Amino acid sequence: MKLKRFFTSMLAITELELRKIRHDQSQIWMRLIQPILWLTVFGVTFSTIRVIPTGDYTYLQFLTPGVLAQSVIFVAIFYGINVVWERDLGLLNKLMSTPAPRSSIVLGKSLAGGLRGTFQALGILIIALVIGIDIILTPLSIIGMFVIIILCGICFSSMSMALASLFRTRERMMGVGQAITMPLFFASSAIYPVSIMPGWLQVIAVANPLSYVVDALRSLLVTGDLSGLGLDVLILLASAAVLLILASLGFRRMLV
Amino acid sequence: MIDNAVTVENLEKSYRKIKAIDGISFSVPEGEVFGLLGPNGAGKTTTIRILLTLIQPSAGSVLIFGMDTRQQSDKIRQMAGYVPQGISVDGELTAYENMLIYAKLYGLPSANRKKRINEVLEYIGLEDRANDMVKTYSGGMMRRLELAQSLINSPKILFLDEPSIGLDPNARNAMWEMVRKLRQELGTTIFLTTHDMVEADTLCDRIGIMDRGKLVIVGTPSDLKANVGGDVITVSAKNASLSEVIEQLGYQTIGEPSNGTADLLVKKGEKAIPRIVESFKEKGVELDSVFLKKPTLDDVFLKYTGSRIDDGAGWAQAKKTRMTYRRMAK
């Protein structure tokens, strides 16, 4: 009974967020612009000069999973700003006065963050196919991609909510978001392989959940070698759990 | 005990060294409209949030329909409605969607959701705007929708935090009408906070006056006003030291005379005026103006706390208190 209540609340919160996106779809289109530029400008340029060793695959093939992951985290990492905004308005106060468990609210919101990423992933996938990038298209690879994207969205939107409870203002959260997205992105295997990074950066890359997102997407969509996928998913699930707990704990602080 | 919707005993809430609520006790019988009246920063919102189990008290006990806020928060939340001071409906959704999400959060069975939502929207008079985006609503409509949202779970007790703050007079009257209707037709216990004396006077069966974390006095509006002990005659004279003269004449005042005006407390004010003007003249003070009014809750507030509820200092103080809390909470 309690569990049923938990899921009803969680899904209600997710529904709330998705309904908002449905009323205003422009943000989804706007947020496709940047990843398109990464693929068509950055990717195309770097694949002509061939400075990044990507083994048997073209640089664009290598880059596509990176851009997919990046487009999701760039949105998710600013998710906390919405929460601060809702806190300032009073919406959060009202939400917390319902019998819905706090963790179901956090989980519902981060799940919405994850689902939001799937729209973008779909857009990027279509563009990648249009510009002729060779991608594995099987039911498994597509479903797998969506699962990884959702997990990635959950991880980074809960990270953002946890940070929001520490920094507490929209302005600071803008700064925090700006400050951590690029390091997360560059210290991952999104745009170059970990093997060519300097030693210290490799250490960071291993601790960066984004590396596992990119790795999982790459094995699903490009290499087809699924041997490392289990570990990737496991690490992502563990990171999501830790970050969700941190975000739930932080939620209490938001309302003092 | 069971007859009381709210029983608060020796409630305290401290943030580090600041006492937001400093040992208050009161009770609200079922079906009553009870108001906490006081300036911003008096601790009213904190009290409401403790009653709603949103924050934990530092000391003391709070029972809602006999249930302890510390132990049975789920049950209390399920039977309570809450209209916070800020905004509680999402502008990016339609009114219906706002209601729908809360119907789900309160666990209304899916079979009755639609019926219940339409019923509440109709009750509150928003049924024809149900599918409009809330951001197109006027302030008064938004407030009504917030009230509707808080009724979705058919609450036994409704908490209204400054229900008419920021509304224009028409919307404010509509809101008051709504609250009266609710209490009359559904028998809902209503617990509200306000800094608006007129609101407290018109809506509440009983009022608790709150100032700097303390509950100063509780009573019905008419008893409280009778307690002031007569009518209030405000006299002003620019160029005289009023307090001295008043002392010599032996008049009773509420508060200290300031800015050349003083509030005298007298029985049967209408008849007293000529005598008062005469007596000041005898002392060589020519009064600029004399003003008689029946005591208001503001005078009650002045009598028990020594300051006016809405004077500048109070607001500045409230703002400062709030900022201190926020800083400490960070």
Image (cartoon, coloured by chain):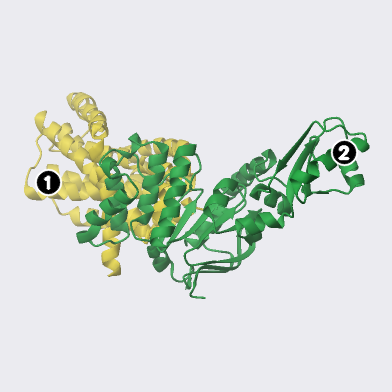
Can residue B127 be seen in the rendering of this structure? yes
Give whichever of A41, A13 is nearer the camera: A13
Give whichever of B52, A154 is nearer the camera: B52
| Left or right of residue B162: residue A140 | left
Q: Mark 2 belongs to which amino acid?
A: Glu
The answer to which image quadrant residue B152 occupies is bottom left
Subunit under mark 2: B
Mark 1, Cα crowd under 10 Å, few <14 / some 14-19 / many 20+, is some
Element marked by disc 1: helix
Say the numbered circle drawn on residue B278: 2
Check the picture and name the quadrant holding the N terminus of chain A: bottom left
User: Both on one chain, marks 2 and 1?
Assistant: no
Q: CA distance from mark 2 to mark 1?
A: 95 Å
The percent coordinates of residue B314 (x first, y second) are 67, 43
Give whichever of B59, A218 is nearer the camera: B59
Q: Mark 1 belongs to which amino acid?
A: Ile
In the image, what residue occupies the spot 18% across and 53% down? A229
In the image, what residue occupies the spot 59% across and 57% down? B207
Element marked by disc 2: helix
Mark 2, Cα crowd under 10 Å, few <14 / some 14-19 / many 20+, is some
Any idea which chain is the green one in this picture? Answer: B
The percent coordinates of residue A122 (x first, y second) are 16, 39
Subunit under mark 1: A
> Considering only vertical position in the picture, is A32 above or below B274?
above
In the image, what residue occupies the spot 32% across and 42% down? A76
**Which residue matches tag 1?**
A142
The percent coordinates of residue B97 (x first, y second) are 27, 47
Any idea which chain is the yellow one in this picture? Answer: A
Which residue, as the protein is rendered here, is positioned at the far front?
B271
